Image (cartoon, helix red, strand yellow):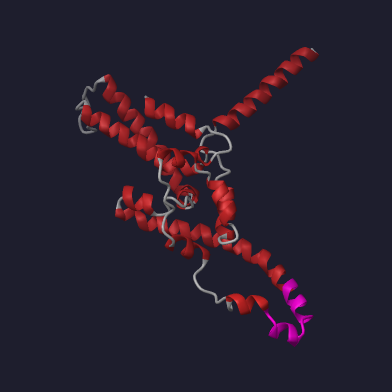
């Protein structure tokens, strides 16, 4: 039960990416692996649906039931790109986690979901950028030819040419190496994206939105329960 307790407490963390949907998939993977290791360790047989009168031990029944529940909710995560992309936006792993832990047959879906959500955010950014471009064009008209000839930025850094897009540049950069377990546990994903949002503005906006989504509904349910309890007490006092 210890792995379940650890991940459950982690999933309820406030103001932390560990408590966001970025922890859901690898959390499921770890717990399912724990179940399979327990089955092998104690030589617990699996349920055979072809045997109607098959009798299983209490532990075997618990493992089968837990596995069924996990599999049910795991499949639901496939209905949105958010869970996968939240993991890809961790600079320490990117696609590496999926390449190391998932079967190759599922990896193409990972790439497709990442691209799909990125394009969706890019469309929103393009709408905002259009008005900015119009404003910049108006200001450029006021420039004289002398100003264009004396361009300090171009002289120092050269002319920027459009190359790889944000996602391509991000994925081609090697995963961020964090040396110790303590540094990994204390690593602040939001702080990293704030430091790199000028390099990856669209990806940073994706990260802020995705990591603000809690992995569990426990905290939300507590808020509603607290409100209901306080309202009930207030009504009783008024009576």
Asked whether 158 or 222 is in front, the reply is 158
Note whether residue 168 is visible.
yes
Image vertical order of residue 53 relative to residue 131, above or below: above
Residue 123 picture location, percent across and down: 59, 64
Classify the position of the N terminus by image quarter. Answer: top left
Residue 122 part of the magenta segment: no
- Between 158 and 213, the one nearer to me in the picture: 158
Q: Is 54 on the left or on the right of 108, as rendered?
A: left
Report whether residue 210 is seen.
no
Direction from residue 100 to residue 23 in the image, left or right: right
Q: Which residue is painted at 44% across and 61% down in the image? A: 173
Residue 31 locus on image (x, y percent): 36, 34
Q: What residue do we see at 51% from left, 67% from top?
A: 165
| Total numbered labels placed on residues in the image | 0
- Residue at 32 percent across and 24 percent down: it is 62
Q: Quadrant of residue 153?
A: bottom right
203 over 75 or under it: above or below: below
**Is 147 covered by the magenta stretch?**
yes
Image coordinates for residue 221, horizontal then vertical, percent: 59, 29
Which residues, given as a range, are shown in magenta? 135-151
Vertical placement of residue 227 versus 185, above or below: above
């Amino acid at each position: 039960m210890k792995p379940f307790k650890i991940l459950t407490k982690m999933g309820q963390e406030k103001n932390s990416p560990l408590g966001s949907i970025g922890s859901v998939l690898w959390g499921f993977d770890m717990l399912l692996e724990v179940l399979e290791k327990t089955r092998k360790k104690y030589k617990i047989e699996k349920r055979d649906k072809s045997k109607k009168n098959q009798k299983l031990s209490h532990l075997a029944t618990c493992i089968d039931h837990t596995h069924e529940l996990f599999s049910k909710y795991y499949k639901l995560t496939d209905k949105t790109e958010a869970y996968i992309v939240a993991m890809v936006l961790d600079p320490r792993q990117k696609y590496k986690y999926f390449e190391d832990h998932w079967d190759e047959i599922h990896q193409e879906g990972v790439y497709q979901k990442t691209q799909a959500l990125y394009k969706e955010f890019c469309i929103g950014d393009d709408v905002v950028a259009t008005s900015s471009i119009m404003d910049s064009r108006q200001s450029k008209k006021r420039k004289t030819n002398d100003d264009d000839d004396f361009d300090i930025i171009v002289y120092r850094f050269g002319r920027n040419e459009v190359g790889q897009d944000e996602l391509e540049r991000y994925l081609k950069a090697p995963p961020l190496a964090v040396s110790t377990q303590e540094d990994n546990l204390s690593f602040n994903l939001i702080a990293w994206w704030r430091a790199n949002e000028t390099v990856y503005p669209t990806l940073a906006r994706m990260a802020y939105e995705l990591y603000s989504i809690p992995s569990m509904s426990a905290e939300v349910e507590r808020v509603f329960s607290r409100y209901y309890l306080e309202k009930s007490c207030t009504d009783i006092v008024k009576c």
